[in-house]
Image (tube, rainbow, N blue to C red):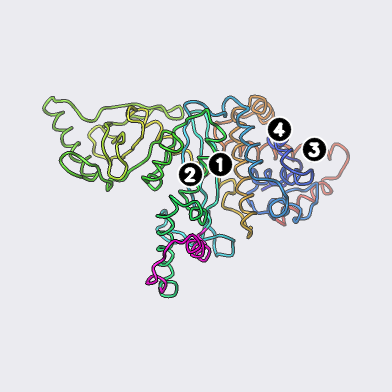
Amino acid sequence: MFPLVEFPDLVQHYAPQFEGVFSAEAYVEFKRYISGLMVSENKTVDGINRLFVTENRNQSSLNRLLTESPFDLATLNKARLRLLASLPGTRMKAKGVLSLDDTLLKHYGHEFEQIANLFDHTSSSYVWAHNLVTLHYSDDETDYPVDFELWKPVDLVKLEQGLRAANVPLKTSKEALKESAPNKWRSYLIGVWQRRQKSNPDVCSLYASKLSIAQTLLQQWVTDYPDLKLPVTFDNWYTQPDFCRFLDQTLQLPYVGTLADTDKINLKSGQETLGEFAGRLKQEHLQALKSGGKPLFHPLTIGFKQEREQYYSYCNTHHLHNFGKQRLVINYQLADLADTPTFFVSNRLVWQAQGITRIRRHRWPVEVYHEEGKAEGLDQYQLRKFSAIQRHVALVAVVYSLLRAAQHDPVLHEQLQRQLKVELDGNPASWRRATQAQCLWSLGLFIGTGLAQGQSLETLMAPFIRTICRL
């Protein structure tokens, strides 16, 4: 990427909103770091530091922002959300949706604190990675992360000692697994923890699973936004009975979860899998269409991000195995029901298929954020310390949020459009490219001004050539 001669306009426009989070020195490094995340292809500390031509700073200054600066992550996150709340287009709205998801931040090698060998469903293999759990907000105008936390692998020694200190019995016959089958020993201890942590706070604090992290993020959101009762949506992995009960009974939030075709439904005629149930409904529906009877699946249309989508839906209240009474929606996308059905459940028994489907559709933006966030550097760190990695992830969230805010900021929109003479699209990737273009414009102005002041082209270009050769 080309060198930077000044901070991008987008950074200069929004950085003052974060000034109170940092010391004076760290504030400068904050602006340097988010500028580099926004425009550089090399998003390591070294790669970002090399971008700045006109002020020569040692890389250690930028590195200290992540490793030593005492700024508080919670304070940074609150400043980010305050900025988003200040613009009508990005503030949270009554029809907004919260979604939960996690993603692997993969790396080669395991020389990173708290990294683990985790299963990657996209490649069906184990990879070294950190796992990021994100609580995301979405409506038809915008979306962005609300809160997030990096999962830590279980500390088996701490867990065993803590369970024994809490007088939780451990089977003597299982202790041989420590040496003979460490993975089985790990599974056994976590299983004991899962069963006991529900009723024992001391046991609960010994380990934070992804579900525990999700509960903490949602509990904090309810504390920060007591007047908003937004629905929460999530995929099959998070749709677990205890988690759903936590949302319903403890937080009193509506939810839309996702079930698999192997999950069970309890009927008067007995228990069936959802796949079997949907197959039977499908045959009854197709037969009804042939005979002029009442169809079981009805067409519905939902709006999502200024688009219209159609589904063919069954909606009713049923008893689902381990979940109790739930509102069940079965959706097909094809009129002849020839595609694979999806299964959604909700604790709001009066909700209809259209509303449940619309809410569940808003789970997709969190996956988009994880992918676009990686384009902003989410998994492109070479930091070893876990606390530094946490700060890097938080600063990537700031960059993504600034790009989202810019879409709804008429002052900044007019400023960049007047300068670049291009139409700006409504997505973060477009604003990232516009910021890169604006930096190129600034570089051109810098060279043009130098030439107008009588400097030689050779003199002006020397530091840029040195920088580019180092990149």
Depicted 72 relative to depicted 106: above or below? above
- The amino acid beneath tag 2 is Gln
Residue 222 seen in the figure = yes
User: Left of 184 or right of it: where is 468?
Assistant: right
Whichever of labels 2 and 4 marks the residue nearer the N terminus, that label is: 4
Q: Position of residue 454 (x, y in %)?
A: 88, 40
Is 171 in the magenta?
yes
Q: Secondary structure at mark 2?
A: helix
Q: Label 3 to label 4, Cα distance in Å?
A: 24 Å
Type of amino acid under label 4? His
Query: 31 or 468: nearer the eye?
Result: 31
Residue 466 in percent (x, y) is at 76, 54
Mark 3 vs mark 4: in front: 4
Residue 60's disc is none
Image-based side of 219 in relation to 435, left or right:
left
* Nearest to the observer: residue 283 or residue 201: 201
Which part of the image, by quadrant, shows the C terminus? bottom right
**Residue 50 can be seen, yes or no:** no
Q: Which residue is mark 3?
A: 448
Q: Are marks 2 and 3 in contact (CB under 8 Å)?
A: no
Give the residue furthest to the right: 454
Q: Which residue is mark 2?
A: 215
Of circles 1 and 3, which is in front?
A: 1
What range is drawn magenta here?
153-176
Residue type at mark 3: give it: Gly
**Marked residue nearer the N-terminal end (2 or 3):** 2
Mark 2 to mark 3: distance in Å?
55 Å
**Residue hosting label 4:** 13
If you read the primary sequence from the N terminus, does the residue marked by circle 1 or circle 3 appear first? 1
